[in-house]
Each structure stands twice: as structure tokens, then as C-alpha cells.
Amino acid sequence: MKKINKAAAFLLVLLMVVTSACNRDNEKPRKDRSAGGTSEILVVTQNDEQWEGMIGDTIRAFFLQAQYGLPQPEALYKLSHINVSGFSDMFKKHKCLLIVEINRNLDKPVVETGEDVWAAPQRVMKIMAPDYSSWCQVFNEQKEAYKVMYDKVERDRILTVLRPSNDVNITQRIKEKLGFDITIPAGFFIAKDEPDFMWIRKELEKNSFGMFIYTTPYEDTLQLELSSLVSLRDRMMQKYVPGPTDGSFMTTEKEDMPPMLNYISTYPTGFAAEMRGMWCLVGDYMAGPFISYTFPDNRTGNLVTLEGYVYYPNHEKRDDLLQMQSLLFSVRIPEEE
């Protein structure tokens, strides 16, 4: 593990015990696959009082808040709990672990984080503090960073499942046209392929998934503002994404759940404008959530948008949207020569 926001790295003792007699060729031993449900964090406390009191309330207030952009309220994460006395090897393989420790001998809180400690992919967060109040304070100060790390584990785990079924024909077409690699699993098909737009879909009996890839010349940073991104999206949707009835087409919901913009540096391209919101139809009644990432492509001078959407009426959609987000995060652009 290493201390967050500290220059010195702190290595887990457990990570040192990785060699054995059958590992003389210096290859790292393969980790067991991590366990746990999608978007689930296992919280490990020293006793029930910590979970049922101030510490548990603080954790729940953040991770159980509703995720923005979904038509039905769904929490960011599901939380499970166990005391450290029952923290067996089986539970140590959970992909997202949050370990609570109150140590009266500490002068101040200490935060440690480890990756793939007991399984892979995995993120272990351990927060130690001299008392409940300081534990909650340091959690609230750094909770967004914890979520970023847990989110990455969720995406990585989904991609380990989806990558083996990658549709080479679709990904090769994307690479020929746009010059980057991305994972598109079996079951998707290219519904539309225009010079500045691609629509890749997966249609099931009760639900459907889709990905849009569209480009426009990049001229000014103002194009990355929310109003510009929404305007661009609406133009592309009206032009290329018709609805099931004559004259209907996709657009962006702007009243009940207006799109929310966030600039991130953790996208594979290095920087992206992340937009979450709801899509709907003009002239019809279909709707659902979407998430998109827009970034400048310095090789082409274009602004590129990758978007994933879900349609699954009267069902929860958080995990389906996470699957689409994971595919969007699989994009890899070759380094410039």
C-alpha cells in the first residue's frame, strides 16, 4: 500500500510474500480473480458499533447517494459489511474493500491504499484514525478520490469479461476510420457508418445498448463547454438517429434531468469532458441514460465524442450503463510518432 498524498510509498508486507519454489523464473504469480457484485464495496470494521454509528453513517451518506442521470433512483454503490473477526480469505478476495481501524495510539489519521493485494482486479482502502471524528473527517476530505479508484476496479473487472469476445470486424473498422482501438464485444453490430458518425448497437428482446462515435473539427475550447456539447449532440442525433415513428428522433433531455458536465484527467486519452444525462425522443416516448466522453484528437484536429446509452424501460440501469462506460474507457490511441 501507499499513503495517499504522501511522497513516500508504503509497501504492503503481504505483497512481499509472492515468490515460491515454483516461481524461480521470476514471473509474478497469478492472482485469483476478485469476487463481489457489480458496484459493491465490502466495508470491514472492528465492531458493529462502527458500522451502525457515525462511521457507517458517513460511508453510507456518500456511497448510497443517488447516481446522477438515471431515470430511477439508484445508489452509486451497494455496501456490504463484515467485522474484522470474520474477514477470512474468502472475503479478502472482494474487488472493493474499505477497511476501518480506530487506533487510539495514532496522532493523526493514516490512509493506505493497495491494488490487487489478495485478488485481481482489486482496490483496498484502509483508513486508520485515533477516533471516530477524525476518521470521518479524512474520509469526507478524500472520498471523491476513493470513488475514482473503486470505479476503475469496476471497469477493469467488466473488461476482463468482455475483452475475450471482442468483435474484430467492428473494432478493425473503427481503427481504419478513426485510428484508435476500442473493445466492442460480441452481439453488437454497426447500425450506421457515416463520415463523421458511427452507431454501434446491441438489440435484445427487452433492452438495448448503443454506442455513438462522432467527430467535428476542433476549433476552440468553447466547444468543450456544456451548451456547445449538448448542441453538437442534438445536431448529430437529429441527423443520424431516427426514432421508431415517422419524424421522431433522439435528443437530449434538458428539463427534468439536464445533462451534467465534469472535466476529468483519468480518461485513457488524458483529458475528456464527461457528460451524463438522459436521452429522449422528439415525437415519441422512449428515453434512457447516456454517458459521453469528448476529447481533442491532436492527430486529426478533430473533437471526438464516444457515447454509450441504455434503453431498458421499467428496470434499473446503473450496471448496464457501467458496462457501456467500461467499453468507452477501453479506447486506446496510438502515441504520436
Image: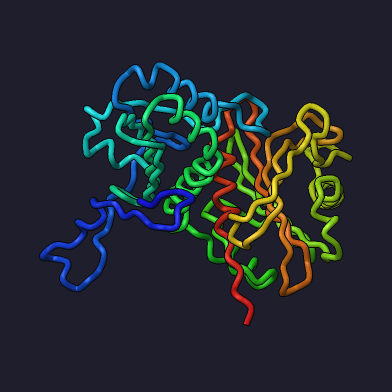
Q: What residue sits 37% from the left and 36% below the top?
A: 107
Residue farthest toward the front in the current orientation of the protein = 107
What x and y, as percent, mark residue 20? 14, 62
Relative vertical location of residue 282 with respect to residue 29 in this rendering, above or below:
above
Left or right, 181 with reference to 221: left
Q: What residue sits 24% from the left and 61% below the top?
A: 29
Q: What residue sits 64% from the left and 49% below the top?
A: 201
Left or right, 58 with reference to 205: left
Depth check, front residue: 64 or 35: 64
Depth check, front residue: 78 or 191: 78
Relative vertical location of residue 266 with respect to residue 41 in this rendering, above or below:
below
Left or right, 316 with reference to 91: right
Q: How is the image coloured?
A: rainbow
Depth check, front residue: 187 or 297: 297
Depth check, front residue: 277 or 236: 277
Q: What residue sits 64% from the left and 39% below the top?
A: 310
Residue farthest toward the right in the current orientation of the protein = 247
How many labels, in total?
Answer: 0
Q: Which quarter of the figure is the C terminus placed in?
A: bottom right
What x and y, as percent, mark residue 268? 58, 60
Instruction: Work out whether residue 33 can be spotted.
Output: yes
Q: Quadrant of residue 299?
A: bottom right
Residue farthest toward the left in the current orientation of the protein = 21
Relative vertical location of residue 166 with respect to residue 105 in this rendering, above or below:
below
What x and y, as percent, mark residue 224? 79, 54
Instruction: Work out whether residue 199 can be spotted.
Output: no
Q: Quadrant of residue 289?
A: top right
